[in-house]
Image: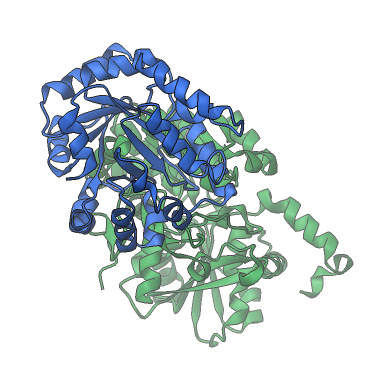
Chain colours: A green, B blue
Amino acid sequence: MNYNVDEKGYYGEFGGAFIPEMMYSNLKELRDNYIIILNDEDFKAEYSDLLRNYAGRPSPLFYAKRLSSFHGTNIYLKREDLNHTGAHKINNTIGQILIAKRLGKTRIIAETGAGQHGVATATVCALMGLKCIVYMGKLDVERQEPNVMRMKMLGAEVVPVLSGNMTLKDATNEAIRDWISNPVDTHYIIGSVVGPHPYPDLVTRLQSVISEEIKWQLEEQTGFSDPDFIIACVGGGSNAAGSFYHYLENEKVKLIAVEAAGKGIDSGESAATMVLGHPGVIHGSRTILMQNDDGQITEPYSISAGLDYPGIGPLHAFLHKTGRVSYEHVSDTEALEAAFRLTQFEGIIPALESAHAFAVLGKHKFRKSEVIVVNISGRGDKDMAAYMNYMKQSVRGKINDI
Amino acid sequence: MNRINELFEKKSGNVLSIYFTAGYPTINSTIEILKTLVSAGTDMIEIGVPFSDPLADGPVIQKSNLSALKNGMNLKLLFSQLQNIRREINIPLLIMSYINPILQFGMEEFCGKCEKTGIDGVILPDLPPEVYMEEYSALFQSHHLNNILLISPQTTAERIREIDKLSTGFVYVVSSSSTTGVKNGFSKEQLEYFLRVRNMKLHNPGLIGFGISDHETYELACKYSNGAIIGSTFIKMLDNDPGRIDRIRDFISSIRT
């Protein structure tokens, strides 16, 4: 089976570029050039140098002994949380800033929800000396103050978005509107495998370094490059796409993507797009999205701001439809429990997003001989308030029992 | 013959088209606004179907979309409000929206309803010409619907030719690289772009939209094309006050004279 994007920008029936004409020339320029640039030897050298010496790659693959014994199997952790800026997001922004420079762009725009992608974008803009404008829903600006401060210190302008529900979906709309209004000098660094073609493919390729490393690191440590399972959380889907990419055609490796069920699938406060969504068009892409019967896009909810997106990348819609990847979901509480378990067994505080991936471990019966790779997409520093809150609520601090 | 094509056969210049959002300012204002616009001398009307995420629109139309949604507007209700509209109104009517609400309604059912209601054209800014051609053009034609395509200052001459070839009705000449509702008058570059498009002598008439806010910009747009489209400025004037009917009349005559 072919899981690559076709020449018109589709994964099966999903993908494409449903954009106003005012954006056509910007996107065409990117579409015509991104493969050429990605294959260019100069680009490759600069990209891999920055990944290694600036972002700190390869990120370690770590055998989680105590967690493995708890679950009765073999669990390896892919440590994207150890990257510079604390998440996998930097893999994408380094790649895109190098593309933007080669396209002669001088002004960078981005959307952000929790602020992780905004920080990763502001970081590479500081590194390259480019002007950076980050659109962030006003509600998120208020909820994620430390990341807002980081972006400002890095020299970015953070624009609070007042339209719609004032969260990630609206920040993305506003970044797209900015790009419509600035078609010549601006590059839009989108943060996930969403948006119009070629973004889903571009971001997938830039994140595919994760699975590329898993392959050789696992072989180095176990003698086999193929695990039995790879598990990653999914909002828009970039860390999952990157973790799965080099294994997509190897059907023996089972792939699990974990969505945020929020307060529960039927609670009305959820972000489990694959369960609650239907095909439609969001942010220029034909994919699965959460919407009402009239086609109005609905506001998702998750305790984790990074999974709080009403759509999902078109590649994922296709992987879901073909059954190549199993899409599961866990609630806020299950994710919190999993975060504390990982922290107490392995001394690693994961981001709330990544904690969702760990919460499915208990829902499967893994064999003792099996090998499971779980991607820790980011670190938990930004989520300390939520973790503290949970500690206060749960049985007077008796979280050791989890 | 489609009323849009009829209009342009009778009238080659100074065509005035007005956009408003159905369900704004109130859920039942649609028919009243339509009738007032016609009696005030509007040549063509674009009825906006509100969408939660209007990518090509600026703050004014975003807000009218959101209000209309809160008021409970949707396509089904709009079609029922419009079911007898052709007994009263003869000018061309278009539906303007985004593709997702139409997809959920069902493209075939939508086209059928449009024909039955007497809608002459559709503007969906996020339905690219290529996808329209491949997936929907036969359907639109079978329901005698014109699909109106946009060009922008960034659109190359070659692509303008292609879009002109795929267009029926008119070409929507977006005046600047922007979302709707920008109000700066027209720059030298914009006038050069209008001239460039006019000199291409397209098969279809052209209407300039985005940034038309008063008599001056309307007149200037008409000098370079067959007419102009006004949206945001018109929406801004609408509110719950019953006096809005007089203001609509005054507004249209202030644009014309």
Direction front: furthest residue: B87
Who is closer to the viewer here, B247 or A42?
B247
| Position of residue B65 measured from the top left corner of the image (x, y, whole percent) | 51, 42
Residue situated in front as seen by the camera: A196 or A223: A196
Is A71 situated above or below A276?
A: below
Left-right relation of A62 to B206: right
Is B183 above or below relative to A306?
above
| Residue at the right extreme of this rendering | A396
Query: Splitting the image into 4 quarters, where does residue A44 fall?
Result: top left
Q: Residue at x 38, y 47 (%)?
A: B85
Q: Is residue B9 left or right of residue A227?
A: left
**Based on the displayed image, in which of its 4 quarters is residue A222 positioned?**
bottom left
Total number of numbered discs in the rendering: 0
Residue closer to the observer: A72 or A380: A380
Residue that appears at 49% across and 54% down: A296
A198, above or below B108, in the image:
above
Q: Nearer the viewer, residue B75 or A210?
A: B75
Position of the C terminus of chain A, as image quadrant, is bottom right
Q: Quadrant of residue B155?
A: top left
**Residue A291 shows up from this direction:** yes
Quadrant where the N terminus of chain A is found in the figure: bottom left
Q: Is residue A193 visible?
A: no
Q: Position of residue A366 (x, y in %)?
A: 54, 85
Identity of the residue drawn at 39% across and 30% down: B39
Going 55% across and 56% down the picture, which residue do you hit? A298
Question: Percent x, y for residue B84?
Answer: 39, 51
